[in-house]
Image (cartoon, rainbow, N blue to C red):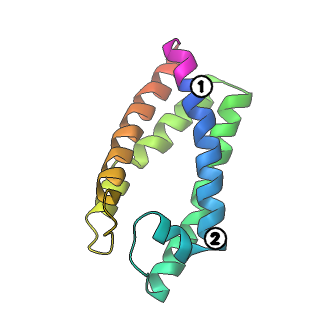
Amino acid sequence: MTAEEALRLANRNMIVFDLLLGSAAIAAPAATLKALGHDEPSPDAKHLFRRCGPIWLTFAAAHLAADRRGSAADWQSLAWLRGTEIATDALWSASPAVTRPGAKLGLRLAGAANVAMAAGFAWMSRR
């Protein structure tokens, strides 16, 4: 598998991931937070998390645009979007409410994945 093929596959996986995450955050924020390793959230935490749903749905749309059109601008936009997410999961992993074993590590690894995707998608925009 070439680097380009791997990045295109990662992009397609992110379409599905962000679509599921965004939809679940809107429809069932408490259950989604629990699945991600969060303790029972307070009402304000549920509402804040629900507000993130449209953000992730927008990410899914951006990944879909890059998959379908593949223009340099699409890949550059994805690099920027993933770059904005580098520290957010690591910051979230510091929350005392994230207690499920492995959840903190998973969130930190998500930050590393965003670094890789940002760099890879930036490369795709320049090729």
**Position of 15 compared to 87: left or right?**
right
Where is mark 1, residue-wise?
8
What is the C-alpha distance between the residues marked 2 and 1?
A: 27 Å
Residue 69 visible here: yes
Residue type highlighted by circle 1: Arg
Residue extending farthest right = 68
- Which contiguous range is marked in magenta? 1-6
Q: Position of residue 61 (x, y in %)?
A: 68, 46
Residue extending farthest bottom = 43
Q: Position of residue 16 (x, y in %)?
A: 65, 45
Residue type highlighted by circle 2: Ile
Is 63 above or below relative to 127? below
Residue drawn at point x = 33 percent, y = 69 percent: 98
| Neighbourhood count class around disc 1 (C-alpha, 10 Å): few under 14, some 14–19, many 20 upward | some
Q: Position of residue 120 (x, y in %)?
A: 45, 25
Main secondary structure found in the magenta portion: helix
Of 101 and 73, the residue lying toward us: 101
Please state the total of marks drawn on the protein image.
2
Residue 59 visible here: no
Q: Quadrant of residue 74?
A: top right
Magenta segment includes 10: no
Where is mark 2, residue-wise?
26
